[in-house]
Image (cartoon, helix red, strand yellow):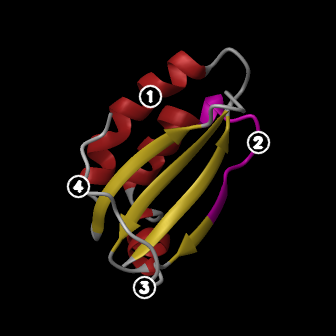
Amino acid sequence: MVWEIAQLEILGGHNEAFESALAEAVPLFHRAHGCRSMQVQHSIERPQRYRLIVEWNTVEDHTVHFRESEDFQKWRGLVGEHFAEPPVVEHTHALAVGFQSTEPAA
């Protein structure tokens, strides 16, 4: 499995509209070939910055199957007008180091 991590810088005053567009885009990722999960994180220190984190079976599921799909065009149509600059995207894989808490969140 690989993770797509995209840093998204949003225009000032667009947060509410961008977050609404993100919610509308969830089904596009949910039905994408090889997409296992998707989440968006919002920076506390930099309120115009978001990180899109998508878990794919393979890099090609993102770079070929999704990016060449109509749903990718729909994704960009929903969120593209809110970008202050082009997204910075990288792909990662997890190392066998770390842990996850089993404690309930406070």
Foreground: disc 4 or disc 3: 3
The local secondary structure at tag 1 comes to: helix
Q: Amino acid at mark 1?
A: Ala
Compare marks 4 and 2 and give the one earlier in the sequence: 4
Tell me how far mark 1 sits from mark 3, CA to CA.
Answer: 35 Å
Report whether 55 appears left or right of 103. right
Report whether 1 appears left or right of 50. left
Q: Amino acid at mark 3?
A: Ala
Image quarter (top left, top right, bottom left or bottom right) of the N terminus = bottom left
Give the labeled residue for mark 1. 21
Q: Amino acid at mark 2?
A: Glu
Instruction: Please tell me whether residue 85 belongs to the stretch shown in magenta.
Output: yes
Residue 12, image x, y percentages: 73, 20
The local secondary structure at tag 3 comes to: loop
In which quadrant of the rendered view does residue 31 lie? bottom left
Circle 2/circle 3 CB separation < 8 Å: no
Tell me how far mark 4 sits from mark 1, CA to CA.
Answer: 17 Å
In which quadrant of the rendered view does residue 65 lie? bottom left
Compare marks 2 and 3 and give the one earlier in the sequence: 2
Image quarter (top left, top right, bottom left or bottom right) of the C terminus = top left
Compare marks 1 and 3 and give the one earlier in the sequence: 1
Circle 4/circle 2 CB separation < 8 Å: no
Report the front residue among 14 and 44.
44
Give the labeled residue for mark 3. 96
Tell me how far mark 4 sits from mark 2, CA to CA.
Answer: 27 Å
